């Protein structure tokens, strides 16, 4: 009589991947909350969702490395979840006039860099060339998330910490500067493969 083997859990449902799924789900929830920018309750709830999503950005990688849960699905979805979270935040904060005037240029720089690096990574993946994440890129992500956290709090944050929005905008410009730096690093690392490709 054949022994009944226990069913193996699908690699799609590892803890690391579930954290990434949570970050994806957080995006439309946060967007919906930011449709009521004048409501302090909506602002604080959106901030809570954003902070939870930002924490999973660190946790999913930590869990994947520590418990050997790395997977092709996780490597694909993780940067997608990050870019969706940041892009949705920037668009909503611009729409509700938290980010206005010349500060919109900082948001444009960040968005353009994300598109550029995503396209470069996709092309290099066809050539089987990996582009490692640098320490500066990790700092860029951290500054970017902190800046967006201050800006999501926005007017509600001003009631507890006067200057919340100026702090957020200053950090957003710092994130934009780091974005240009890391974007150039990625281009410099990948451009030789694009030029040397005979196709």
Image (cartoon, grey):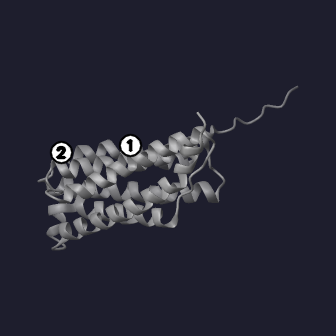
Q: Residue at x 44, y 60 (%)?
A: 182
Left-right relation of 70 to 105? right
Mark 1, secondary structure of its residue? helix
Task: Tell me the quadrant of the picture where the N terminus can be found.
Answer: top right
| Residue 94 spot, x, y in % from top left | 19, 51
Residue hosting label 1: 25
> Residue most toward the left?
38
Q: Which numbered disc covers residue 144? A: none
| Residue 153 spot, x, y in % from top left | 22, 61
Q: Which numbered disc covers residue 35? A: 2
Which of these two is toward me, 95 or 185? 185
Which of these two is toward me, 146 or 127? 127
Task: Tell me the quadrant of the picture where the C terminus can be found.
Answer: top right
| Residue 18 spot, x, y in % from top left | 51, 46
Say whether disc 1 or disc 2 marks the residue closer to the N-terminus.
Answer: 1
Left-right relation of 71 to 145? right
Establish if 5 lies above or below 78: above
| Residue 101 spot, x, y in % from top left | 13, 57
- Label 2 CA crowd tier, 10 Å (few <14, some 14–19, many 20+): some
- Determine contact: label 1, label 2, CB under 8 Å: no
Q: Residue at x 51, y 66 (%)?
A: 135
Question: Residue 145 occupies which quadrant of the picture?
Answer: bottom left
Left-right relation of 148 to 186? left
Mark 2, secondary structure of its residue? loop
Q: CA distance from mark 1 to mark 2?
A: 17 Å
Establish if 190 lies above or below 199: below
Establish if 178 lies above or below 88: below
- Label 1 CA crowd tier, 10 Å (few <14, some 14–19, many 20+): some
Q: Residue at x 60, y 49 (%)?
A: 130
Q: Is residue 62 visible?
A: yes
């Amino acid at each position: 009589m054949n022994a009944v083997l226990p069913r193996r859990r699908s690699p799609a449902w590892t803890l690391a991947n579930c954290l990434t799924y949570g970050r994806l789900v957080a995006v439309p929830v946060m967007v919906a909350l930011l449709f009521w920018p004048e409501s302090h309750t909506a602002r604080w709830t959106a901030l809570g969702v954003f902070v939870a999503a930002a924490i999973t950005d660190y946790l999913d990688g930590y869990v994947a490395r520590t418990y050997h849960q790395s997977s092709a699905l996780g490597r694909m979805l993780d940067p997608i979840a990050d870019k969706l979270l940041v892009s949705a935040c920037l668009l909503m904060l611009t729409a509700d006039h938290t980010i206005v005037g010349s500060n919109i240029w900082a948001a444009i720089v960040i968005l353009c860099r994300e598109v550029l690096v995503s396209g470069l990574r996709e092309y290099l993946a066809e050539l089987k060339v990996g582009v490692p994440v640098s320490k500066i890129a990790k700092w860029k992500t951290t500054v970017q998330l902190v800046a967006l956290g201050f800006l999501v709090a926005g007017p509600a944050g001003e009631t507890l910490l006067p200057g919340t929005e100026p702090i957020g905008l200053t950090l957003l410009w710092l994130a934009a500067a780091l974005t240009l730096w890391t974007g150039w690093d990625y281009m410099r690392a990948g451009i030789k493969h694009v030029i040397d490709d005979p196709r």
